[in-house]
Image (cartoon, rainbow, N blue to C red):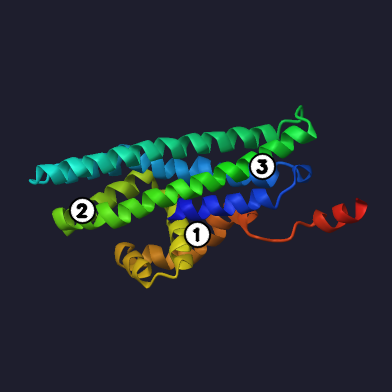
Amino acid sequence: MSLVREAGRLKQLARRSSSDEGCGPIKQASDYVVGFNMKGLHKIEADLFFPWMRNKLTAVEQKDLARAFGSVMDELESDRKKVAKLGESIQRQADSLCDETKNRLQRADAVNGIARDAAELEICARSMMDTENSLLVPSLAEVVPEGEQKSFNGKVLKNLGILDSRLHLVGMHEAVRESDSSEEREMFEKAIPRIPRALIPRWKRTLYVPRTDVLDEREPKSRKSAFVSK
């Protein structure tokens, strides 16, 4: 959910940006969305979540159901690789935007390419999330005891690391808050201990905003003067 939200914000940033405005904001945004958010998600998916989910769901007694789950997992793995390639493309184009040897047309193409790839990344990541939420998560809830689920959550946090998990937690909180889903908010409050939840405003101010403020929608300062000069 967090990656879907941030990819959408990166798409909007690129769409309202001009290659004449410099590469700083888009480079900072792509470093966060792809280099941090997506990288952290894929680290968990590849090393922990997908193997654990495949193991649990393909071990069910009904063989046809196990094969169906395996097929869904294969599709998710394929989609994850597609998302990773889109992320790599975004970062390459952000680097190209910052390359002073590139001409104005090449930089403009880089900005448009980032907007296009971010839009496709958002769509693909949302499709993966919808598949997991509608088909796999309810099934896991049926076959995996709640205690084991909580133990797995602990492994995820440990794998992310203390500092990174704080930043990911704020990103998750922002995505849940904007979803307008009371069910998601209830699950967030149930899954996240009280003390970390209480620290989210502080971590947002000190960790999240400095990395993501360029993604906030605002009128570029140079837009009016650039228009007049034309």
Residue 208 at x, y percent in the picture: 54, 55
Does 169 sit above or below residue 33?
below
Q: Between disc 1 and disc 2, whose residue precedes? A: 2
Q: Is residue 167 visible?
A: no
Amino acid on which the number 3 mark rests in the picture: Asn
Does 5 sit above or below residue 193?
above
Q: Quadrant of the N terminus?
A: bottom left
Q: Is residue 30 left or right of residue 142?
A: right
Disc number lying in front (1 or 2)? 2
What residue sits 59% from the left and 43% below the top? 116
What residue sits 20% from the left and 57% below the top? 141
The residue lying furthest to the bottom in this view is: 182
* Tag 2 residue: 140
Q: Between disc 3 and disc 1, whose residue precedes? A: 3
Amino acid on which the number 2 mark rests in the picture: Leu
Residue sitting nearer the eye, 2 or 117? 117
Mark 2 → mark 3, Cα distance in angstroms? 40 Å
Residue sitting nearer the eye, 188 or 108? 108
